[in-house]
Image: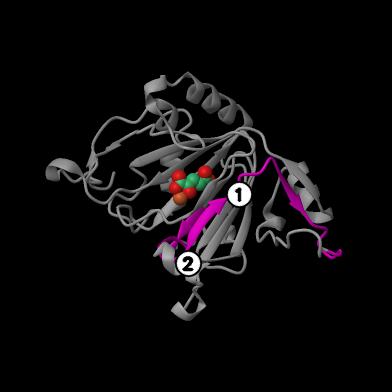
Amino acid sequence: MTSKLEPYRVPNTDAVYYIADFISTEEEAFLVHKINESPLPKWKQLSHRRRAVLHLRFMTAKRVLIPEAMPSFVDKYPDIVGRIRDTGAFGSSPHGGPNHILMNEYLPGQGIMPHEDGSAYYPVVATLSLGSHAMFHYYRYKESLSELSAEDNADAGRAIDMQPVLSVLLEPRSLVVTTSSLYTNHLHGIDGVIEDILPPPNGDSRELPSVRIANAHMLTCQDERHATSHGGSLTRGTRYSLTCRDVEKIAGGLPFGKR
Ligand SMILES: O=C(O)CCC(=O)C(=O)O
Ligand SMILES: [Fe+2]
């Protein structure tokens, strides 16, 4: 990854970068307003939450991108796409920056099951959080078949080790960049809870989930800093995430080329 991102590298990994205050509170308020204004057909109701393929640029069922103009609230004011491009996160990707953005809405209590983002994208995702924090966990698969229980085998999927390999607290207005092995052979997810409980760092955490926040020292919001340094709980509000990726194949064979 580029040297520009290096100061934002989350300790204990070489694959995740955390940038607090990637946008201002004014920009956040503007974006949330724009998101809520976006026409309803753009929203898709998933089983647990709404996702708007604010498709900025559209992807077909065959996972090929059809060029479409992005709404101005992601590439003019605020110029999220340009700012992400400037971080160098997509410096080696086919189009040098994100060309596709999926937007998720999470009400308190809603989350996203551990999953992989898949191979249609270049293996970098930059996620902007708006409105509320989220506790974001990365998971690995269990290694060998012998570790699989009969139940796991019946499921025919690979068993997931539910002890996260890395947990980061995503503050509102922050950008988290996931790259390389944490993109390609790990999973990620957010628990569907109404509050995140953080144990006191050196206290007795036997009765509490032992979550170690890898980016605790990088946080800038008062409540998040307090909860991670002293223990406590953080109540979820409505959160929007803009997940920005580079779709490798573009319909019509017209390469975008780097801007
Ligand atoms: O909301 C987030 O931060 C994660 C969303 C996600 O993993 C996805 O859309 O693939
Ligand atoms: Fe994802």
* Position in image of residue 19 (x %, y %): 58, 50
Name the quadrant of the C terminus. top left
- Residues rendered magenta in the picture: 177-204
> Is disc 2's CB within 8 Å of ligand 2?
no
Earlier sequence position, callout 1 versus callout 2: 2
Q: Does the magenta stretch include residue 182?
A: yes
Q: In screen coordinates, is 87 left or right of 249?
A: right
Q: Which secondary structure lies at badge 1?
A: loop
Residue that mark 1 sits on: 191
Q: Which secondary structure lies at badge 2?
A: helix
- Tag 2: amino acid: Asp
How far is the residue under mark 1 from the one under mark 2?
Answer: 20 Å
Q: In screen coordinates, is 137 left or right of 64?
A: right
Residue that mark 2 sits on: 152
Write down the quadrant of residue 7 in the picture. bottom right
- Tag 1: amino acid: Asp
Q: In this view, does 95 lie above or below 5?
A: above
Q: Which mark is residue 161?
A: none
* Position in image of residue 32 (x %, y %): 55, 26
Which circle, 1 or 2, is nearer the viewer? 2
Name the quadrant of the N terminus. bottom left
Q: In screen coordinates, is 116 left or right of 208?
A: left
Q: Which of 54 and 8 is in front in this view?
A: 54
Report the residue at 42% width, 65% height from top. Answer: 154
Q: Does the magenta stretch include residue 10?
A: no
Seen as rendered, the residue at the extreme left is 252
Seen as rendered, the residue at the extreme right is 203
Asked whether residue 95 is in view, the answer is yes
